[in-house]
């Protein structure tokens, strides 16, 4: 009899927990650009994932990787069912457009998100920019060079934080290619997050794979960015190296990102 009562109690508890779990809504392929050319209309779309009938949630604007030459715009599975909203961003690719054009696409997507998030229940003051590889580069460029979003009437410094997973922090290889510079020749110019270091940027979380397994000195680039941010007085930058993982290090990195987002959220309350 005691075992039966215990079983029924556990079953009721599971049903209650499930009933209290939020239902999530997903919308795909929403155009965010005002450009009417076919390529922009094809690429410049966002996918949205948010908890239904929930207010004031954190929203991650996610930029996918792919070297700025390709990649798949999708909501990362690891960010689903976590009580947050996610907006994944598609953008145009080089060599059809220049790196500068991609960054403007990204800024347009953030502007669209900023203008529409309250309709879905989110909070304009609870945005996080995040991405992997090329997407992390985009996140850092928008976060450190205030001009892209300032042109849209948005103050990036109001955002909760930036999560950059295995980003280039020197001039992106695609931008160097536009100048005829080989990928093994480093450069720091206006197309490098390092060029824009400033102390009043939003909190920044940098994560890379193992320095011996990563792409082309990726850990060292991030370590340099962390050091320069600290030297100019930035107080909330961190760097983590995931031993044993190569450039595709998102599996262990996503839980770290979610944990950091939770900390940022508590700091805004």
Image (cartoon, rainbow, N blue to C red):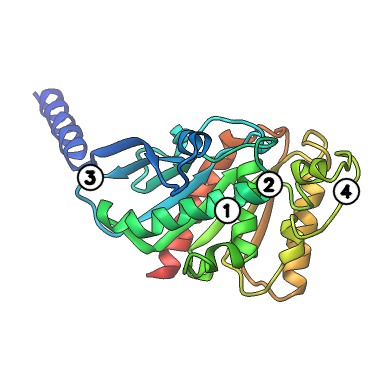
Q: Do labels 3 and 2 touch, CB within 8 Å? A: no
State the mark number for residue 196.
none
- Work out how far the residue at label 4 is from the one at label 3, CA to CA, in angstroms: 46 Å
Lower sequence index among marks 2 and 1? 2
Few, some or many C-alpha atoms within 10 Å of disc 3 (few <14, some 14-19, many ≥20)?
Answer: some
How far apart are the alpha carbons under marks 3 and 1?
30 Å
Identify the residue at image location x=67%, y=74%: 199
In the displayed structure, does residue 106 sit left or right of residue 17? right
**Residue hosting label 4:** 186
Secondary structure of the residue carrying numbered label 3 = loop
> Upstream in the sequence, badge 2 or badge 4?
2
Q: Position of residue 44 (x, y in %)?
A: 48, 41
Q: Nearer the viewer, mark 3 or mark 1?
A: 1
Q: Which residue is mark 2?
A: 99
Q: Secondary structure at mark 1?
A: helix
Image mark for residue 52: 3
Quadrant in which the N terminus appears:
top left
Is residue 205 among what the camera can see? no
Quick check: 220 left or right of 126? right
Q: Residues within 10 Å of mark 4 (few under 14, many from 20)?
A: few
Question: Badge 1 is on which residue?
Answer: 104
Sequence order check, earlier mark of 3 and 2: 3
Q: Nearer the viewer, mark 2 or mark 4?
A: 2
Is residue 260 placed above or below 12 in the rendered structure? below
Of the numbered discs 1 and 4, the one sitting upstream in the chain is: 1
Q: Nearer the viewer, residue 108 or 73?
A: 108
Q: Residue at x 61, y 51 (%)?
A: 103
Q: Quadrant of the C terminus?
A: bottom left
Q: Is residue 223 left or right of residue 56?
A: right
- Residues under numbered marks 4 and 3 in contact, where contact means CB atoms less than 8 Å apart: no
């Amino acid at each position: 009899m005691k075992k039966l009562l215990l079983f029924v109690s556990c079953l009721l508890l599971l049903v209650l927990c499930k009933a209290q779990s939020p239902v999530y809504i997903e919308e795909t392929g929403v155009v965010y650009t005002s450009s009417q050319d076919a390529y922009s209309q094809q690429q410049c779309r966002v996918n949205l994932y948010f908890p239904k009938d929930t207010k004031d949630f954190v929203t991650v604007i996610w930029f996918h990787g792919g070297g700025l030459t390709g990649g798949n715009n999708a909501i990362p599975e690891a960010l689903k069912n976590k009580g947050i909203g996610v907006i994944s961003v598609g953008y145009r690719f080089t060599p059809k457009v220049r790196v500068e054009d991609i960054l403007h696409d990204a800024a347009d997507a953030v502007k669209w998100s900023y203008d529409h998030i309250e309709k879905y229940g989110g909070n304009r003051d609870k945005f996080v920019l995040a991405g992997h590889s090329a997407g992390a580069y985009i996140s850092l460029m928008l976060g450190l060079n205030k001009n892209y979003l300032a042109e849209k009437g948005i103050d990036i410094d109001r955002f909760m934080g930036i999560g950059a997973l295995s980003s280039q922090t020197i001039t992106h290889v695609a931008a160097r290619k536009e100048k005829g510079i080989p990928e093994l020749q480093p450069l720091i110019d206006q197309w490098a997050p390092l060029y824009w270091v400033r102390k009043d940027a939003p909190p920044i979380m940098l994560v890379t794979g193992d320095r011996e397994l990563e792409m082309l000195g990726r850990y060292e680039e991030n370590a340099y960015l962390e050091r320069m941010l600290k030297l100019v007085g930035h107080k909330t930058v961190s760097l983590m190296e995931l031993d044993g993982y190569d450039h595709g290090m998102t599996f262990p990195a996503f839980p770290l990102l979610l944990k950091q987002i939770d900390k940022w959220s508590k700091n805004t309350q």
